Image (cartoon, rainbow, N blue to C red):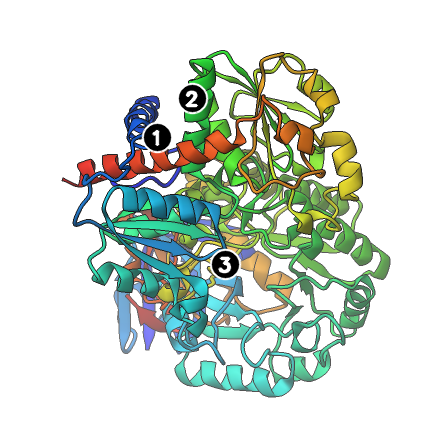
């Protein structure tokens, strides 16, 4: 099927496009972007198929009128948990990708903390196959750095890459042993893939269930100090510099991490970083009254950290916005705060929350789109996150003025665990197109 | 309000009402026949997920003095060991038709979680390292009895404040009434309470200077070897209360301890048994305060 998206405001940072125009899709691929300013020229061209492209004369062409809407490359989410295999009661590849697509996300990278852990080519192969059969958007598995994510022996990077892995991470756990982390950063150079680090000094964080500070003292909860993240970021940056490996820092939540990463980038260390909407949209206040839906790791921090993260996004220290979509079953969150698992179901609120960064002047619209499309795509070496001719037709059409109320019961994700329940958000995807297939 | 989950959630007026009501019950407890029919027909379940002798005994006796029907539910006999979730346990108990749930749990916030999910009145008998509101109320009652009021008093809380729910509840209560609270202990055991009117002292002699009240906290032996302090011997040397140190406080200062005491570790025997100690009176007042809390919550329910 062919699709013509007309009159939208196209933003594609990969081609520095920011203006009105049309997008033409044929057989699941982007064929052409025609900017309004160029239209006159196009119509004068001799090529008939292009001459008449706007008259819907093309066979089986569906026309989408995007007047007043933004047309962006489909979002690339480089940090998610799809839970399959092993935790299908929390989420499956099917439900997870459906939720992602509703959130405007067309490429999903899933972390290896499944059961069994994605630490070998067989599990990778299972995920890839399942995603082809049941997934509604592209799924790119991230393999474990160490076997069983236990921090001991390196997993078979090469074999897993052969089966479809695009990066490595022990996410959920840090690689505690500095030597193993060094080896991972060194060995991964063979394949030019990033090592994604979950930075947490377990000895400092042990037993903690929220940010350490005045509020944790007043709630009687053991805190996780910012220092537990900062010291690991510092260690990993030093190891990246030492080895020349590619380091990507997952879910940055603290002012200290931003500072360390900024300094490292200034020195030319091969490091990139991501944060998530909950680290710039809310603070630890969300856990008041022991709200387990706001329990997440790293924990929600304080306003000072939020400001630092926004500054890091603004000045480019933080390259990427991910969801860290971490669905859990309702029963798991309905228990003692200490015992409840960490995680936020993020697919269906991420874009709306991130658009706030444009509204409050932190980022321009192209900067925001860059951090949710081409930046993660480049870090992972994917061919997505762009509207370049010949790319997969992954597109999201966004109405930045449309209001909606967050109602977790209506999430397509099995995970209803959101701290944004009942929030009125502004701006949402209205149509997502995955490889030419329209979801509206 | 249907529950007592913490001092944080109470207003000054609420606390005054509880203390005044406790005063009446204190008189009842001096009579020959100490039982009143105030809550006849009401059912209370004591839900203790953590071992407790003192608090549980005090609650149970207070409940019996008020003529309630008492159910005891403690961990070893419960289905918790069979893997039932807390939520299911509590809903099951609610289905019996209880009016009050008195709960102690090692996780902070459990009383709040339960209060949100049941109609019964929930009374926090200690949650994790968060609060122990009835202990703070009985401490306040005991201080007011001796000193007339809390306002303007210099009150030192000494020891493991970080892990003490008693200390936390007391800090919130004393702050509401304009007392000057001093926290004394090693830096490893003092949490960030800077939102409240507290002064922190690592040097106990300085911290005790001219105080009206000294509240000693129990040092839990398991903190040793975890890096909070090197040994109980060194702890007592720096933050133990003996007769020599007691002299830094005002002459008429009172000494309190929520129990159970470690004699020779945080408090010397001569201090514990001295005329300045009101430790046993605290125990008696605990009964009156817990009766008052239940009596008032029953009123709210009607």
Dot 1: within a 10 Å radius of its alpha carbon, few (fewer than 14), some, or many (20 or more) residues?
some
User: Which residue matches tag 2?
Assistant: B176
User: Which residue matches tag 3?
Assistant: A342
Circles 1 and 3, Cβ within 8 Å, touching? The answer is no
Image coordinates of residue A8 in percent, x first then y, are 34, 53
Image coordinates of residue A363 in percent, x first then y, are 51, 40
**Measuring 53% from the left and 36% from the top, which residue is drawn there?**
B258
Dot 3: within a 10 Å radius of its alpha carbon, few (fewer than 14), some, or many (20 or more) residues?
many
The one nearer the camera, B45 or A17, is: B45
Circles 2 and 1, Cβ within 8 Å, touching? The answer is yes
If the image is split into quadrants, where does the C terminus of chain A sit?
bottom left
Q: Secondary structure at mark 3?
A: loop
Q: Which label sits in the foreground, 1 or 3?
A: 1
Q: Is residue A43 visible?
A: no
User: Which residue matches tag 1?
Assistant: B10
Q: CA distance from mark 1 to mark 3?
A: 30 Å
Image coordinates of residue B61 in percent, x first then y, are 35, 45
Image coordinates of residue A332 in percent, x first then y, are 41, 64
Q: Secondary structure at mark 2?
A: helix
């Amino acid at each position: 099927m062919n699709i013509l998206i007309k009159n939208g405001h196209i933003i594609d940072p990969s081609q520095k496009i920011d203006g009105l125009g049309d997008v033409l899709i044929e057989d699941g691929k982007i064929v052409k972007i025609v900017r309004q300013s160029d239209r006159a020229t196009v119509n004068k061209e001799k090529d008939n198929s292009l001459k008449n492209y706007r008259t819907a004369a093309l066979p089986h062409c569906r026309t989408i009128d995007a007047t007043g809407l933004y047309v962006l490359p489909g979002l690339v989410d480089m940090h998610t948990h799809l839970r399959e295999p092993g935790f299908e009661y929390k989420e499956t590849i099917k439900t997870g990708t459906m939720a992602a697509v509703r959130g405007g996300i067309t490429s999903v990278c899933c972390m290896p903390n499944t059961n069994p852990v994605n630490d070998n080519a067989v599990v990778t192969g299972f995920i890839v196959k399942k995603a082809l059969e049941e997934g509604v958007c592209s799924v790119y598995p991230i393999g474990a750095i160490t076997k069983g994510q236990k921090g001991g022996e390196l997993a078979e990077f090469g074999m897993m890459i052969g089966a479809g892995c695009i990066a490595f991470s022990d996410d959920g756990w840090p690689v505690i042993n500095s030597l193993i982390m060094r080896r991972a950063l060194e060995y991964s150079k063979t394949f030019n893939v990033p090592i994604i680090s979950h930075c947490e000094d377990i000895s400092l964080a042990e037993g903690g269930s929220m940010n350490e500070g005045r509020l944790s003292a007043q709630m009687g909860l053991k805190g996780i100090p910012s220092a537990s993240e900062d010291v690991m970021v510092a260690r990993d940056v030093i190891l990246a510099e030492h080895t020349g490996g590619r380091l990507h820092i997952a879910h940055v939540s603290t002012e200290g991490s931003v500072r360390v990463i900024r300094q490292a980038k200034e020195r030319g260390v091969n490091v990139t970083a991501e944060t998530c909407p909950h680290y710039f949209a809310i603070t630890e206040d969300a856990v008041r009254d022991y709200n387990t839906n706001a329990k997440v790791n790293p924990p929600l921090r304080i306003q000072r950290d939020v400001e630092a993260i926004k500054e890091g996004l603004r000045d480019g220290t933080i390259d990427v916005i991910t969801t860290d979509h971490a669905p859990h079953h309702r029963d798991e969150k309905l228990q003692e705060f200490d015992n409840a698992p960490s995680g936020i179901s993020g697919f269906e609120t991420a874009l709306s929350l991130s658009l706030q960064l444009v509204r409050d002047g932190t980022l321009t619209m192209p900067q925001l789109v860059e951090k949710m499309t081409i930046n993660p795509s480049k870090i992972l070496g994917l061919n997505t996150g762009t509207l370049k001719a010949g790319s997969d037709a992954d597109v999201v059409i966004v109405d930045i003025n449309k209001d909606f109320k967050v109602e977790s019961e209506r999430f397509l994700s099995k995970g209803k665990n959101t701290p944004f329940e009942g929030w009125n958000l502004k701006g949402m995807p209205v149509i997502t197109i995955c490889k030419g297939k329209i979801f509206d | 309000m249907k529950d007592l989950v913490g001092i944080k959630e109470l207003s000054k007026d609420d606390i005054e009402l509880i203390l005044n009501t406790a005063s009446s019950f204190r008189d009842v407890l001096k009579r020959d026949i100490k039982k009143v029919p105030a809550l006849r027909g009401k059912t209370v379940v004591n839900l203790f997920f953590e071992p407790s002798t003192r608090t549980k005994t005090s609650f149970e006796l207070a409940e019996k003095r008020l003529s309630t029907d008492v159910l005891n539910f403690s961990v070893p006999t419960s289905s918790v060991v069979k893997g039932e979730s807390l939520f299911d346990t509590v809903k099951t108990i609610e289905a019996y038709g209880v009016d009050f749930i008195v709960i102690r749990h090692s996780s902070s916030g459990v009383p709040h979680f339960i209060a949100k999910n049941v109609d019964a009145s929930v009374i926090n008998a200690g949650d994790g390292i968060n609060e122990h509101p009835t202990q703070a109320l009985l401490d306040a009652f005991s201080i007011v009895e001796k000193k007339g009021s809390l306002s303007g008093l210099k009150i030192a809380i000494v020891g493991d404040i970080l892990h003490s729910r008693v200390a936390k509840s007391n800090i919130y209560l004393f702050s509401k009434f304009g007392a000057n609270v001093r926290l004394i202990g090693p830096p490893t055991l003092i949490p960030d309470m800077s939102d409240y009117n507290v002064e922190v002292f690592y040097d106990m002699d300085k911290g005790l200077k001219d105080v009206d009240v000294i509240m000693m906290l129990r040092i839990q032996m398991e903190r040793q070897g975890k890096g909070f302090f090197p040994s109980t011997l060194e702890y007592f040397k720096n933050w133990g209360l003996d007769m020599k140190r007691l002299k830094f406080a005002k002459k008429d200062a009172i000494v309190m301890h929520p129990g159970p005491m470690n004699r020779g570790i945080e408090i010397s025997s001569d201090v514990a048994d001295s005329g300045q100690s009101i430790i046993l009176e605290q125990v008696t007042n605990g009964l009156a305060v817990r009766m008052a809390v239940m009596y008032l919550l029953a009123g709210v329910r009607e």
